[in-house]
Image: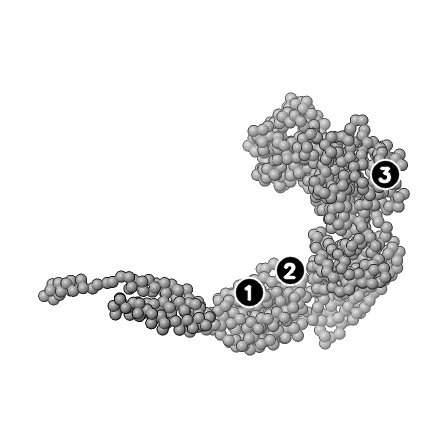
Amino acid sequence: MLVFNSPWYLLLLGLLPPMWWFSFRSLSGLGRWRRMMALAFRTLVVLLIVAALAEMQFQRTSDRLTVIYLLDQSLSIPEDRRLSMIDYVNESISEQRKDEKGDRAGVIVFGRNAEVEVPPIDFDIQLPKVESLLDREYTNLSNAMQRAMAMFPHDSAKRIVIVSDGNQNIGDALEEARAIADAGVSIDAMPVPLDERNEVTIEKVAIPADVRQNQPFELRVVMNNESSDASQAATPVSGKLRIVRKAGGREETLIEETRVIEPGKSVLALPENIEHANFYTYEASFTPDDPADDALTQNNQATSFTHVQGKGQVLLIEDWENPGEFDHLIERLRDEGLEVVVQPSNRLFTSLPELQTYDTVILANVPRTSGDDAATVSSFSDEQIQMLVRNTEELGCGLIMIGGPNSFGAGGWTNTELEKAMPVDFQIKSAKVMPVGALVLNMHASEIPKANYWQKVICQEAIKALGPRDYCGLVYFGSTDTWLWGQSKGGILRVGPNRQTMLARLDRMTVGDMPDFDPGMKKAATGFALCKDAAVKHMIIASDGDPTPPSPSTVKALKDGGVTVTTVAVGAHGPAGSVTLQKIANATGGKYFVVNNANALPKIFQREARRIARPLVFEPNPPVSPRITAQHEIVQGIADTIPPVSGFVLTTVKENSLVDVILTSPVPTESQNATILAAWSYGLGKSVAFTTDAGQRWTTPWTGWDQYDRFFSQMVRWSMRPTGDTGKFAVATDVKGSKTRVVISALDDEEEFLNYQAMNGTVIGPDMQPITLDIEQTGPGRYVGEFDSSKPGSYMIMVMAGDATLRTGVNIGYSDEFRDRETNTTLLEQMAELPAKRGERGKLMPALPQLPEDREKAQKALEPQLAIDPYRRDLPQAVVSQDIWPWLVLAASCIFFGDVFVRRVQVDFQWLAPIWERFAVVVLG
């Protein structure tokens, strides 16, 4: 059948009579037959063009049917029922799909997300198992229906078969079903019954979101014991109830007892009183004595979160190798009314919530890595550094770095995330200030497990710790001892312009079994000799210790060149190899490490790379008095005369207008490298760089300075997490499904609504990733923000409301997937009853049974479900349209050429007469 998409263009056919009239007269000179042929060609061209403009299509009907099965694979569906779904789909496709009509079948599986397990295909397929990766802790049926609509082919009728318990917790499946039905898609639904067993749930742990120190409050644990079969009453369930309180790294058990959970809801009330300010998590869990008494264990645990307010606290992290170095500063800060907690660098925080107790964190001359042997070496991990930075940038905590020979760049902090948070860079880029070191890495640890991987990791850590003006070389044994880079330049290159090249070359390094230490160490001695401006020269050898020892002349050349050599024995072959490495280290003034666990290697190389940063320590002689170069709250009320300092760590001021350089040294003359005190705002928090120490080594005259207490207390208080006046703001959280709403109520001092307040917030999720919290005013004095909280765990929430900082949090225990224990047959029935456009209503199938393993018995058990044929013909046949107007345009173009030919070319056939006469004479006689 031919149809037109734009039939109004057919009115243009009315132009044919005028065209005939004018063409008949204008073509009169062509003769009768040529004129008639030209008119015919023109008429055909017009007809074809008008038909093309009207978008002529060829339509046909198709008796094909496409069925897409939507299988609920969320965790609320028992495993045996999920297997039964696959059996049902396989039987339905093999028995009911009509191959002679070209019917298609497809399968979509869904949880929180929907994935195509089998696209619509027109042959029988047997699904062995579900292969798609899904987030099974939520049910999003509407998303699965949307995915199905996107998959349906256009040339068939369409039906969806939903196999689910109907307990959606994301999206609106009924609304999506209405849209699908309006589009002509039929919906069949098969309920999945849930296990008819007792179900014990801990619904919630209820506590106030914010309490004061020593303020009594009540902890309430709400439990529920019900039967999934409404016709049967639940029975008492005995088990162990445990309630714990967590704060930072500490965990305290409040209750651990055997308890019988009676049918119905029950509430356990527990009086609580907290003495210390912190963020606290309360966790309640129930473990039944008999697992058969409880259908799901995922909902047997609930958590809650509260913030106990108190005076601001300061966390001071000190180097565990030098305890007590900052005791004087700690004592003076405590006298100023500040609560200071001291933490050694080998027993650090392990999570971001642990840092929420504190309003400022001080890194007091603490190196990134410390320890003298492989057994005791410790370091700040990348994750811990990231926690420190995010605690400042996104949660508003202060961050102070106090100098010393183990701090800033001299402490191995170069090129870390911490450097980004400080108002100064830890590297020196100026050629006039010459803190230059040279490092050579000698790799021969080829016989340890994953040798090449570990050697690349440790070399990367060492290279990242070097400054841009430092030198670095790497010699390894391939077929011979070879420089990995810079062979034509002595093997040692300046790091700044070559850092990325060095790191890239590491990926191509393959270390062999070095037979002799001497060639590689000779190469290193020659290369070091070319580094004329290097103040520190250091070499690290990682080896199993079995190569031939180096010659005395090679060791002497290294010593004469001022090179220290640290050796790391990894997988050494007995005492002889270890003795060789130890002798090399002792002879050159280096250190000797014996490593039994390869995980210690990166920490050792971080520590040893610090030797190259020694020139960053600047010790003027005689000592110099810092100058106040900017008025700032930290130095408010401080006299212009500052006691002298005999040393500090060289840094470079960041090129940022937010940086305030408050104290500088008169030397060196490069002012950007002479910073003593600098501060800036970093994200929601503030950070301070104080490049000298606090009285132990370089500032001993400061301990008797009458402004000492004021100076350091003002520094700490300026950096502390802002609190502001939070009395006019109240913050609450509300968890709905996978979303958490943050609601702020704002009142002024006269209890009137505060409107048009600028608010913004940040959330740190359980994975330590920041989540932006957009907050909008939704009513008088009411501000609301929302964020995704689908992952279980603790969420730290920081809201900046004018000058006030509001801190709270929320704990997500388990998904709503484990709350509903009754099949939502009503929803499935409502969707199945929706009539498809110009078609019949769908069918609500009998519930999916639990199928036996035997194939024949399974087929028999599925007979009631298979009695409803999803491939039945109760939908209008699909109409398939094919555009043919492009062919019409092509035909019009060809015919138009015929019209031109007839009008422009006169064909005379008189020359055929003599040929015919001759042919007749010859052939016919």
Q: Position of residue 619 (x, y in %)?
A: 77, 29
Determine if residue 852 is in view.
no
How far apart, in angstroms, are the residues tagged by discs 3 and 1?
A: 71 Å
Q: In this view, does 153 lie to the left or right of 769?
A: left
Q: What quarter of the picture does the C terminus occupy?
A: bottom left
The residue where tag 1 is placed is 150
Query: Which is more N-terminal, label 1 or label 3?
Result: 1
Name the colour scheme. Answer: one colour
Vertical order, 337 against 64 (above or below): above
How far apart, in angstroms, are the residues tagged by discs 3 and 2?
A: 59 Å
Type of the residue with mark 1: Ala
Query: Which is more N-terminal, label 1 or label 2?
Result: 2
Determine which of the numbered discs, if any, sits on residue 638 in the image. 3
Type of the residue with mark 2: Asp
The residue where tag 2 is placed is 135
Residue drawn at (62%, 37%) of the image: 499
